[in-house]
Image (cartoon, helix red, strand yellow):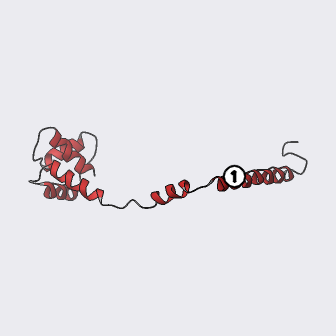
């Protein structure tokens, strides 16, 4: 990812076709040593391509990625009725009462620092 970011920075700086030396210089300015193999792969894949077109292609591919799960949770919340909500409130109150009585039994009448 850092190689792509450095490539994009170089393009934004006006260099339409950055070389590996250009990217190494950008990465070196922030203390990152470039791996030659990864850097060459990025250069090879992006050589001769318009960066804006590549990003637009990627954006269209992301649009087709399923996000899953989120919709069912919203539907489940929207489907709650007044009766269900009231039942949950009653259960919550009962659980709170149980927790209070259990916690008072735990200390058995004396504290740790008594």
The structure residue drawn at horizontal position 84% and vertical position 42%, both measured from the top left corner, is 113
Find residue 91 and report its image quarter: bottom right
Q: x, y (%) of residue 99?
A: 78, 52
The structure residue drawn at horizontal position 25% and vertical position 53%, both measured from the top left corner, is 59
Q: x, y (%) of residue 87?
A: 70, 55
The structure residue drawn at horizontal position 24% and vertical position 39%, both measured from the top left corner, is 29
Q: Residue furthest right?
A: 109
Find residue 11 and report its image quarter: top left
Return the residue nearer the eye: 102 or 88: 88
Find residue 42 and report its image quarter: bottom left
Tell whether 93 sits left or right of 104.
left
In the rendered view of the protein, which quadrant contains the C terminus?
A: top right
Task: Give the labeled residue for mark 1.
Answer: 86
At mark 1, the secondary structure is: helix
Q: x, y (%) of residue 14?
A: 12, 38
Q: x, y (%) of residue 104?
A: 85, 49
Return the residue nearer the eye: 17 or 87: 87
């Amino acid at each position: 990812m850092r190689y792509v970011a450095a490539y994009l920075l170089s393009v934004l700086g006006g260099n339409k076709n950055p070389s590996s030396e250009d990217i190494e210089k950008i990465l070196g300015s922030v203390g990152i040593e470039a791996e030659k193999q990864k850097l060459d792969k990025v250069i090879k894949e992006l050589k001769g391509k318009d960066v804006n077109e590549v990003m637009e292609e990627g954006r269209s591919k992301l649009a087709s990625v399923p996000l899953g799960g989120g919709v069912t949770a919203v539907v489940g919340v929207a489907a709650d009725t007044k009766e269900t909500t009231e039942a949950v409130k009653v259960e919550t109150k009962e659980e709170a009462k149980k927790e209070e009585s259990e916690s008072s039994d735990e200390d058995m009448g004396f504290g740790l620092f008594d």
